Image (cartoon, rainbow, N blue to C red):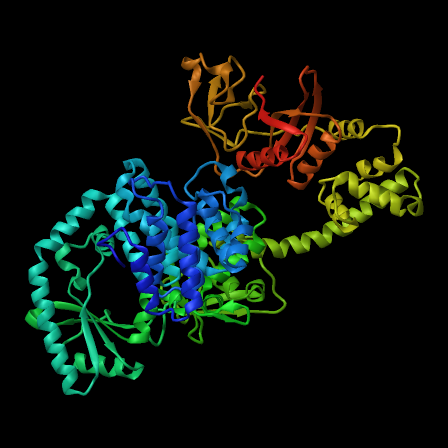
Amino acid sequence: MRKDKPNITYDELFDKISGYITNKSDRKMITKAYLFAFEKHFGQKRHTGEDYITHPLNVAYILAEINADPQTICAALLHDTIEDCDVTKEELANEFSLEIASLVDGVTKINKLNFTGTNEAILANHRKIIVGLTEDVRVIIIKLADRLHNMRTLWILSEKSQKSNSKETLEILVPIAHRLGMNKIKSELEDLSLRYSRPDIYFSIVEKLNQSKLERNTNIELMKESLTTLLNNHGIKHKIKGRAKSIYSIYKKLDTGRRFSDIYDLLALRIFVDKEQDCYQALGIIHSKYRPIPKRFKDYIAMPKENGYQSLHTTVFGENGQLYEIQIRTYEMDKLAEYGIASHWSYKEKGKTIMQSAMEEKLQFFRSIMELSKEEENDESFVNSVKDDVLNSMIYVFTPKGDVIELPLGSTPIDFAYRVHSKVGDSMIGAIVNGNIVPLDYKLQNNDIVKINVNKNSFPSREWISMAYTAQAKNKIKAYFNRIDKEENLKKGEELLLKELRKKKIASSDFYKDENIDKILDELHIGDLTELYINIGNNKISPTSVVNIINVEELTKEQLLLNRVKANQEQKINVKNDIIVEGIDQIKVNIASCCKPIPGDSIVGYITKGNGISVHRSVCPNISDLDERLIDISWNSNIDKKYSTSLLIYASDNKNVLVDVISKTASSNISVQSINSLNSIDNYMYELVILISDTDKLQKYINDLEMLDSIIKVERLIK
């Protein structure tokens, strides 16, 4: 990667692309994209004071260094025009092509992501954006180049922004670059992130490297000469290069407690040969002269890494008794090792690029994202699952046939089984790891060989949900039981509705008229009778309320809903085991009715006179001046019941508001205890009391309500 000169001119870019893009019309299109971007960004400046066009030029140059296709180079030049220049996707499609416009649009969407944000509202659109990225991997690669140039000029930003950008780069973009096998970009992103997040450590390592540079270079040259002579004597055509260890990789090894002088691969060489068999011949020749260190040999040619990386690794006692890490690979393997999936740049094949086809075929992380997108119903859960299951530290285990399965660190045989196939997981009866029977909660290790025993008549256990580590496995287990529960609830709901009709002496033939069913489904915002039965069967909708939609014409919708929710009996909740009072085991605990805290709220205890501990939200004004009688309390981590809390709903009109509110509670598995209309001069107000499990679900429910056209705002009520 080019580091020495941050400002690339278009002439330099054109010279670079001309080295591999020979089609004149493609080069003409790239020039047109540059002139278009130059015009649209004219007058705009970067924080560094440079003309803004220097940024897209540098991004395009980074991509040209890995031989990006013409469409990607154009998209790189145009990648900020939609976001910063009021250019539309349609305008780009008309000027260039829909393919280029879609790439630019994808990068624009990615730039709106904020993985490090804490506001749950930020997560609302992440599902469609992340899944959209996997539709064309070039979008991700443009983003990586975009971030790399921004990191090269990060010095201009405040220290806080430097650390924030570095954190996001290390947590999100570096793992993606690793999954794509793009080691060259990954390595520079890591080094730059360390420079700005831990400058003291970064410059300490740089200083140590500079101090030992002369000695290292001397030893490297001595070993190169010796190996060159050795391989030439055996007729092995080759090239040898000294390999610089990245500063970040040195930092990671030092962080594990190793000494600087003990890091073997500070003296590192890379040998390039023509054919795969030459790799093994070269290895044997080297080992015949230089003694290898046991357990430091790795054959990534026979067993490639999940991202396609292939090479032989060995560490030997070399010249002057020094330890040398040697990598042996073909030129083609080196191209894949440096550029990863980006080494597959190509024109279309059956509607997709060769690179996209290779990604779908080879990369398990791609398939994991797609599976999670289908399984996770909640946007926040999906984004968190992508970070936990796809971007975290991974292990590599094997099937009995030698196929590599990539899993997050912490995975169990249950995760392995469901990663292989849902049917394998559902019918699993046991696991054998490295020839030994292991429990299903066994933590898999790198290089484990895992065999899953199955029985077609077997089925999952609900306990597996807590034993599995990945969201993918947990979701598939839940999906199995959801299917079972749906069948039971479907039958139960139909029976309950027929029982209600008999109770009210209503003939089924009269009730099940098309116009009646259409009215019921429309009122409850439900798709079909099957869904209605399931909602009745799982107690989300009462059969009485369904029948009353048709049977009680004189009541308004709002009156009917108010009657329905007021008919629900308030649950009596024993909170004693859900609240932990420091140093006290046996004491009466009550939830304060003024602020109605729920699990997830920051809480504080108030010592009442004769009625135990009253639990308040920390923000409750009723306890703000009562410091001397307040004590520290906390929620138990294992709570499986719902708690009551109050919401104040402001609406612009009262048409169907309550119908919509009740519909949202039903679809979110939230129980309504009461709804009261409040007097207001400016708008319509309602006090809604609900039973809900925690603050995460409450915030999502509030967001869902505020998306309704008639709702102005929703806030929690403290009396």
- Classify 549 as above or below 537: above
**Quadrant of the image containing the N terminus:** bottom left
Is residue 691 at all visible to an observer of this figure? yes
Residue at figure coordinates x 58%, y 25% from the top left: 715
In the depicted view, which residue is nearer to us: 58 or 462?
Answer: 58
Q: Exactly how many numbered labels are in the figure?
A: 0
The answer to whether 329 appears left or right of 369 in the picture is left
**Residue 579, image x and y in percent?**
50, 30
Residue at figure coordinates x 33%, y 58% from the top left: 61
In the depicted view, which residue is nearer to us: 140 or 705?
Answer: 140
- Classify 652 as above or below 92: above
**Residue 335, image x and y in percent?**
32, 70
The answer to whether 641 appears left or right of 562 in the picture is left
> Which quarter of the picture shows residue 242?
bottom left
**Residue 473, image x and y in percent?**
52, 57
Residue at figure coordinates x 57%, y 57% from the top left: 476
**Quadrant of the image containing the C terminus:** top right
The answer to whether 650 appears left or right of 561 in the picture is left
In the depicted view, which residue is nearer to us: 439 or 226?
Answer: 226
Is residue 414 at all visible to an observer of this figure? no
In the depicted view, which residue is nearer to us: 144 or 564?
Answer: 144
Residue at figure coordinates x 80%, y 26% from the top left: 559
**Residue 206, image x and y in percent?**
15, 51
